[in-house]
Amino acid sequence: MKTNTLSPHQLELRVCDFAQMFNSMDPSPFLVKDLDKEAETFIETWALGLSPKSKLQIIIHIEHMPTDGDPSSLLTEAIHNHFNFKAELVRREFKQLLRRGRTSLIIGMVFVSLCLVAADIIGQFGSSTALTIARESLTIIGWVAMWRPLQIFLYDWWPFVHRIRIYKMLGHAHIRALQGK
C-alpha cells in the first residue's frame, strides 16, 4: 500500500477575531454556521489549484483570541462541516447532471434514429439535389441532437468530480488557530 509522503500544503489566514471567519447573518451555532463568503472563497481558490490527493493544513492567525480557550476545535468542526456539506451539494448536482445526461441520451438516440430512418426513406425516392440535401440535413440534425448528451458524458462531469474531491479534502484538512497579527 502506497502512502502519501507529500508534505501538507499550508494556507495561512489572518483575522482580527474569531467571529470574522463566519457569516454574520447566519444565526446558527458555530458547529453548523456558514463560513464568511470571503473566507470560503479564499480557501476554495487556494485549494482548487492543488491535487485532490494533497494533505491540507489551514492555520488561522487570530489577532484577538477568544478568552474562553483555544478555538481550534470549533474552527475545525465548523470548517469540516461546511466543506463536507458543500461536497454533498455538489454530489447532488452531479447526480442531477447524470440523470439529465441519461434522459438527453435517450431522447437524442430516439431522435437520431428517427432522422436516420427518415433520411433512408428519402434516399429511396432518388438522388436529386433537393432529396440529397434533405437526406444529409436530416442526418446532420440527428447527430447534432446527440451533442448535449455527449458533452455531458465526455466533458461536463469532470469539474463536478474535481470539486467534490477538493471539498472532501477541505473537509478533512488539519485546522489550527494561533494567536497572531
Image (cartoon, rainbow, N blue to C red):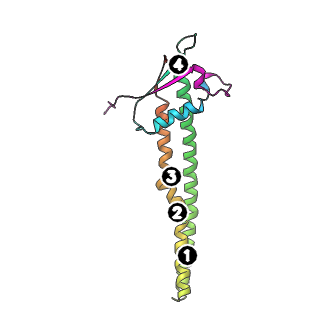
Asked if the residue at tag 3 contacts the one at tag 1, i.e. Cβ–Cβ closer than 8 Å, the answer is no
Looking at the rendered structure, the kind of residue marked 1 is: Leu
As helix, strand or loop, the secondary structure at mark 3 comes to: helix
As helix, strand or loop, the secondary structure at mark 2 comes to: helix
| Mark 3–mark 4 distance (CA, rounded to whole Å) | 40 Å
Looking at the rendered structure, the kind of residue marked 2 is: Trp
Residue that label 1 marks:
138
Residue sitting nearer the eye, 78 or 3: 78
| Mark 4–mark 1 distance (CA, rounded to whole Å) | 65 Å
| Mark 1–mark 3 distance (CA, rounded to whole Å) | 27 Å
Camera-side mark, 4 or 1: 4
Residue drawn at x 55%, y 71% is 141
| Mark 3–mark 2 distance (CA, rounded to whole Å) | 12 Å
> From which residue to which does the magenta span run?
1-30
As helix, strand or loop, the secondary structure at mark 1 comes to: helix
Residue that label 2 marks:
147
Counting other residues with Cα less than 10 Å from the Cα at mark 4, is it few (<14), some (14-19), or many (20 or more)? many
Residue 176's x, y, as percent? 47, 20
Looking at the rendered structure, the kind of residue marked 3 is: Asp
Counting other residues with Cα less than 10 Å from the Cα at mark 3, is it few (<14), some (14-19), or many (20 or more)? some
Looking at the rendered structure, the kind of residue marked 4 is: Ile
